[in-house]
Image (spheres, rainbow, N blue to C red):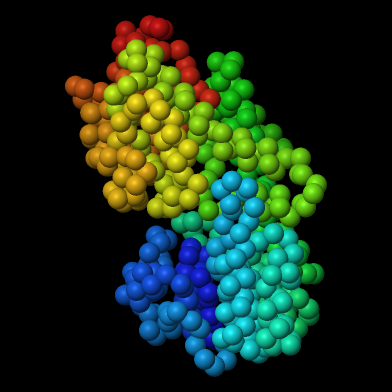
Amino acid sequence: MPKTIGVVGMGYVGLTLTAALARKGHVVHGVDVQPNVLDSLARARPHIFEPGVAEVFAEQINKSIFVGEKLPAGTLDAAVLCVSTPIDEHTHRPNLSNLASAARQVADWCGPETLVVVRSTVPIGTSRRVVLPPLLHAWGHARLVMAPERTIQGQALRELVELPQVVGGLDEESLQAGVEVFEGLARTLVPMSSLEAAEMVKLANNCHTDLIYSYGNELALIAERHGLDPLEVIQAANVDYPRPDLAKPGYVGGGCLSKDPYIMISSAGETEPFLIGRARALNEYLPEHVATTVVDMIRRQRGDTQGAVLAVLGWAYKGWPPTDDMRGTPIAAMMPVFSEAGLTILGHDPMVSDDVIRQYGGEPVSLDKAFSEADAVLLINDHPDYRALELGSLLADRQPKVIFDSWRILDEHAANNAGIRYAGIGYQPAAIGTSGALS
């Protein structure tokens, strides 16, 4: 049965949920505090790229999707809190002020007949400790559930349907109301025994992912010290071996993986977890390590780095599925290293605007110019456009002396034949000159 649902916060989580609910026939009222966000959504121009979302808004705005500064008067079946819970840059403690404010607003706008759903990622115990009190103060009785978002960017509308939806309730009445809201959206529901159990599920998923990726990065750093190819080692280790596959090395960023481990750590209280913080530290170290490696390679090829030109391909935090999301992007940690070395940075990304590249300190260029005008090229993400590059055709008369291919997707043989120093994460083979001799 179609429902009327409010979504508070039109960031990535709220935006995609709004589109998915509207596509299933529900009426959705989206709320945000940023006038420019509301203006763009009202014109059916989502401010965040996600495949399929713009099409849903173009079809449903002012029909089944409505946006405004506050939820409408009258009965809403549910109000879903999708506001940000950022991490303090210095203390790494989560800031829950947006969530507390959203809870107070819902308490003012709605009544006890409205189910309140926490979808923001929060420390364990937050729904009960931060969201519930203002609801009880205003209403005397509240129905509250935690239903964490677990989608991946680039596939959100599909995963909102296909991924099991975890739902934990304040009580049985709340749980049943939460199941009714999401059973028309997700194919599989996973009822939990409590709000806290549901809160921990999201953190458990993302911390596990961070741990897995950090191990691949650890292997790459060890292989590098021994002059080994980490991909050769990892691929061989995975061949028909009946235990979990090892992850390839790579950058680990984005809005969730760069902050959720810290939220889990804060949930542990005075007992510091053994693994989570170390895995996060390793993944945060990797971009700096790569940046330092690239600077050293340029220095070895040119004799110095002052005035050298480095072209950086891929500024979004990941290339597949394609996204324009800059949260947790490796380039943010790399730029101070490049600036200290005196490098001029050229930038290219199929998804990221020229203005954003400039904001991060780069000068936007075409792919052709990236290869023809730079002393070195650093490929950071694996966007399909980069996977499809014909490296040989890009290496014209003037070509880079160094290519650092973080994802090992470019033609290493073509680079070697052109006399270019080729490397990747944890991979620095002996330089090969145009004659084919090791140097």
Q: Quadrant of residue 280?
A: top right
Q: In the image, residue 271 lies at what x, y percent?
A: 80, 47
Residue at x 73%, y 69% (from the top left corner) = 129
- Left/right of residue 413 with respect to residue 156 in the rendered view: left
Residue at x 27%, y 42% (from the top left corner) = 364
Residue 183 in sight in this render: no
Residue 210 in sight in this render: yes
What is the quadrant of the N terminus in the image? Answer: bottom right
Residue found at the very far left of the displayed protein: 397
Q: In the image, residue 293 lies at what x, y percent?
A: 46, 23
Q: Does residue 434 sit above or below 28 in this rendering?
A: above
- Left/right of residue 121 with respect to residue 388 in the rendered view: right
- Left/right of residue 17 with respect to residue 187 in the rendered view: left
Residue found at the very far bottom of the displayed protein: 74
What is the quadrant of the C terminus in the image? Answer: top left
Residue at x 51%, y 50% (from the top left corner) = 254
Residue found at the very far front of the displayed protein: 90
**88 or 299: nearer the viewer:** 88
Q: In the image, residue 250 lies at what x, y percent?
A: 53, 36
Total numbered badges shown on the rendered structure: 0
Q: Does residue 11 sit above or below 287 in this rendering?
A: below
Residue at x 66%, y 61% (from the top left corner) = 122
Q: In the image, residue 26 lies at what x, y percent?
A: 51, 82
**418 or 333: nearer the viewer:** 333
